[in-house]
Image (cartoon, helix red, strand yellow):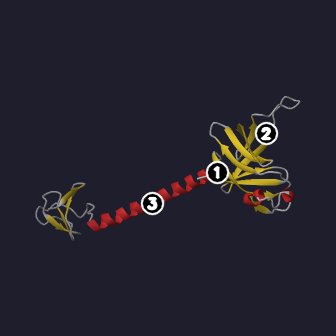
Amino acid sequence: MGYSLFGFYYRGGNYMYCRNCGSPVKEGAQYCTKCGATVGNKKTYSRKKFFIIGIILIALLACLIGVIGVYQHDQNDENIVGKWSAYSIVSTETGEERTIESLLENEWKEDFNTSGPVLSFEIRDDQTFKIQTIDDEETVTEEGTWEQLEDSRWIALFLSSQEPDETGEVKPFGIVRVVDGYLEYPDSIRIWKCEREE
C-alpha cells in the first residue's frame, strides 16, 4: 500500500499513485489511465528524487554547522575571560623565547632580567582578575580589576593594592591581550605568554 505526501500517493519502484483516484501511475506519465486526471503537469517526486533532495539538505546543514563551529572557535580563541597558565617568555630585544619551565630551573634568569616569573592569570567576566607570580622563591597572589581599552583587543589591569599617584590617578600595572590563542602580558623588555587552561 502506498503512502501520502503533499496530496500524491507513492510506493516503491517506478510507480506512484494518482492523487485523484488512487490508481497506480507509472513515473513520467502525463495522465492517469483509469480516471484521466492530469498528473504530468504536476511535480511528481519519486523516492530517488526525495533521496537526492535529502542529501542536498543534509550537506547544506553540515556546512552551516561547520561555519558556526569555526566562528565559535574563533570567538573562544579571542575571549580573554578564563584561566591562563604561563607557558613561555619572549625577549623583546632579541626575540628569543624560552619556556617558563626553564626559568623555574634558574638557568637563564639574568638573560631575561627577571627574578621570578608570572605563573598564572585568572581573568573573570565580572571585570576582576587574579595573578600569581614567584618572588624570592615564594608564590605571590594578587587581585584587582580590569578595564577594556579603546583598542578592544587589550585590557588594563589594576591591582587592589595600588595607590594613586601625585595626580590622584591610578595607572594600570600592566596590560594583556589574546594573540593566536595565547594571553600576552608585555612589559618593557619581555612578553609573558600564557596558554588557556582546559
Cα distance in 3D space between marks 3 and 1: 24 Å
Q: Is residue 46 above or below residue 125?
A: below
Seen from the viewer's position, the closer of residues 9 and 173 is 173
Please state if 9 lies on the left or on the right of 34 as rendered.
Answer: right
Check disc 2 and give the amino acid type: Pro
Seen from the viewer's position, the closer of residues 188 and 86 is 86
Q: Residues within 10 Å of mark 1 (few under 14, many from 20)?
A: some
Check disc 3 and give the amino acid type: Ala
User: x, y percentage for residue 37?
Assistant: 16, 60
User: x, y percentage for residue 139?
Assistant: 74, 46
Among numbered discs 1 and 2, the one appearing first in the sequence? 1
Among numbered discs 3 and 2, the one appearing first in the sequence? 3
Among numbered discs 3 and 1, the one appearing first in the sequence? 3
Residue occupied by mark 3: 62
User: x, y percentage for residue 1?
Assistant: 14, 62
SS label for mark 2: loop
Q: Residues within 10 Å of mark 2 (few under 14, many from 20)?
A: some
Residue occupied by mark 2: 172
User: x, y percentage for residue 132?
Assistant: 72, 45
